[in-house]
Image (cartoon, rainbow, N blue to C red):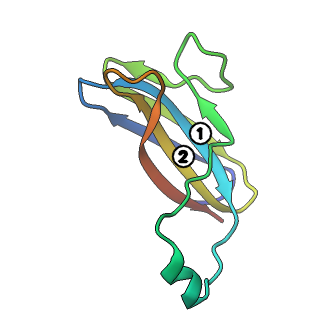
Amino acid sequence: MKAGGTLRVAGTLSSEVKVGAVGIVRLDDPKPLPVAELNRRRNYPQPEPSEMFWPRGFKTRIELQTSGQHFSIDLPMPGPRGLYEVSVWAQHPGEKSFGAVSLRTVRVN
């Protein structure tokens, strides 16, 4: 997407989870890894969001709109240019905290 645009994030979660938040973090452009490093890796670390957007009742810069299990938010993407990970967070039954249930990467040009 173009820098200065707005990214619409919306969805509907299954009834057994509680809608939590939408998170965002800017990433450095990926760089090629040596074959030895690729063979050694067993997972890909997910960076923590630099900002989280919560529903009404939480202190948040932009309020996450919720209606039942549906959520939506319009995120301004002013830049800088680069890759941004956008995550959706929810709370499963019996869990004390929210965890990521969806992750998408967007390139801002």
Name the quadrant of the C terminus. bottom right
Residues 62 and 1: in front is 62
| Dot label at residue 38 | none
Furthest residue toward right = 80
Q: Looking at numbered disc 1 in the image, what kind of residue is underneath it?
A: Leu
Residue 67, percent from left and from top: 36, 18
Vertical arrangement, residue 13 with respect to residue 33, above or below: above
Residue 11, percent from left and from top: 35, 36
Marks 2 and 1, the one that precedes in the sequence = 2
Q: Is residue 21 left or right of residue 102?
A: right
Residues 103 and 68: in front is 103
Furthest residue toward top = 57
Residue 108, percent from left and from top: 63, 61
Q: Are dots 2 and 1 in contact, CB under 8 Å?
A: yes
Residues 57 and 76: in front is 57
Write down the residue under mark 1.
75
Q: Is residue 15 left or right of residue 20?
A: left
Vertical arrangement, residue 11 with respect to residue 59, above or below: below
The answer to which image quadrant residue 31 occupies is bottom right
- Label 2 Cα crowd, 10 Å radius (few <14 / some 14-19 / many 20+): some
Name the quadrant of the N terminus. bottom right
Furthest residue toward front = 40
Write down the residue under mark 2.
7
For the image shown, how many numbered marks are present on the structure?
A: 2
Furthest residue toward bottom = 35
Q: Is residue 44 left or right of residue 2?
A: left
Vertical arrangement, residue 78 with respect to residue 60, above or below: below
Residue at (67% x, 71% y) in the render:
29
**Which secondary structure lies at badge 1?**
strand
Q: Looking at numbered disc 2 in the image, what kind of residue is underneath it?
A: Leu
**Which secondary structure lies at badge 2?**
strand
